[in-house]
Image: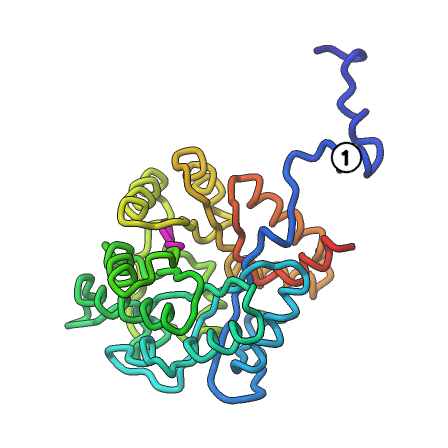
Amino acid sequence: MSFPIHRPRRLRMNKVVRKMVRETCLSPADFIYPLFVTSGKGVRKKISTMPGCFQMSADEIVKEAQSAHRLGIPGIILFGIPEHKDEKGTEAYNPKGVVQMAVRAIKDKIPDLVVITDVCMCEYMSHGHCGIVKKGQILNDPTLELLAKEALSHAKAGADMVAPSDMMDGRVAVIRDILDANGFDDIPIMSYAAKYASAFYSPFREAAESTPQFGDRRSYQMDPANRREAIKEVALDIEEGADIVMVKPAMSYMDIISDVKDTFDVPVAAYNVSGEYSMVKAAAKLGWIDEMRIVMEILTSIKRAGADLILTYHAVDAAKELWK
C-alpha cells in the first residue's frame, strides 16, 4: 500500500472519474420538503427567521408542492398554523382544519405526491406545548387520545403517511391502533423516534407559531447529551409499529443517525432543521460561504451518515442543483 504504487489522486483528477467512484450520491428522491399551511387564500407570508420559507394558504401550498414534484421530490410534510388555539388543541383534529383541507387540495391536484402530516399538538395548543397541561405538567397518557384523533383525521383527509413528533411515550402504538381500527392499516407511520430538545429549533417557533408559553420541552424531548437512549427510543417505536424512524436534528446528531442505521433494519429519516437551515442562509447573506456548496455538502453528509430520507427546507434548491 505504499507510494508510488498507490496514488489515490488518480481517482480524483477530473470530475467525471470523481463522480464514477463516488460512494454517496444524492438524488431529489432523497428529500422530503417541509411546508407550513395556514388559513385563507392567496397567502404567502414570509418567515423572517427562515429566509426563503413561507406560511402559505392551501392554494399556494398546492403551487409549491407542484414545483417540488416537477423536480423529482417525492414527498412533502405539512405543519399547520390554525386560526384558533385552545387547551385541547381542537383544531388539530378538525375535519376542516388547515392541514386536512390542504391534504385534500394537494391530493386532488397531485395524486402521485406523497403527503405526510406532522402529528403534534404544539401548534394547536394555546400554551404551545405538545400535550395536555395540568398544574404546569405536560400529561402523557391523556395526550395520546388527542394525537390518535389527529392522525385519524389526517388519514381520512387523504394523507399518505403520518409523522408523530410530540415525543409522548406510547403514541406510535395508539396511532397504529386507531388507524388499523378504522381501515387505514396501509398508512405508514414515520415516527420522530429520536427527537432531541435542541436549540436548533428556534427559527421554527416563528414558522409554526408554537413557542411554549412557559418552561421548555425538556421533560419530553431527549437530552442532547444522550446517545444510547436514542437506541432505546427507536426500538420502542419500532416495537409499537413505526415503519420509518427519524432522528432530529441532523447535523449535530450524525452519530445518532449512524447508530440507528447500523442497529435497525428499517428506513431512517433525518430532519435538517430550521436552525441548521437559517445558519447557512445567514452566513451566505454575509458572503462568508458558498451557499449551494455548503448545502450540498451538508445533505451529502447526512446521507453518508445513514439517512435514507432527508427532511430539509433546502429541498427545492438542492433538487435544482442536482438537475444541473
Residue 47 visible to the viewer: no
Residue nearest the observer in this picture, 123 or 188: 188
The picture places residue 246, in percent across and down from the top left corner, at 42, 50
- Image position of 90 with respect to 74: above or below: below
Residue designated by label 1: 18
Magenta residues? 190-196
Q: Say if the magenta span includes residue 300.
A: no
Which residue, as the protein is rendered here, is positioned at the far front? 183
Residue 287 visible to the viewer: yes
Q: Classify residue 157 as left or right of residue 67.
A: left
The picture places residue 172, in percent across and down from the top left corner, at 29, 55
The quarter of the rendered structure image containing the C terminus is bottom right
Residue nearest the observer in this picture, 88 or 27: 27
Identify the residue at horizontal 68%, vertical 57% (top origin): 319
Q: Classify residue 235 as left or right of residue 79.
A: left
The picture places residue 202, in percent across and down from the top left corner, at 46, 65
The picture places residue 160, in percent across and down from the top left corner, at 44, 63
Which quadrant of the figure has residue 183? bottom left
Display colour scheme: rainbow
Q: Which residue type carries mark 1?
A: Arg
Q: Classify residue 110 as left or right of residue 95.
A: right
- Image position of 152 with respect to 296: above or below: below
The quarter of the rendered structure image containing the N terminus is top right
Identify the residue at horizontal 43%, vertical 76% (top origin): 99
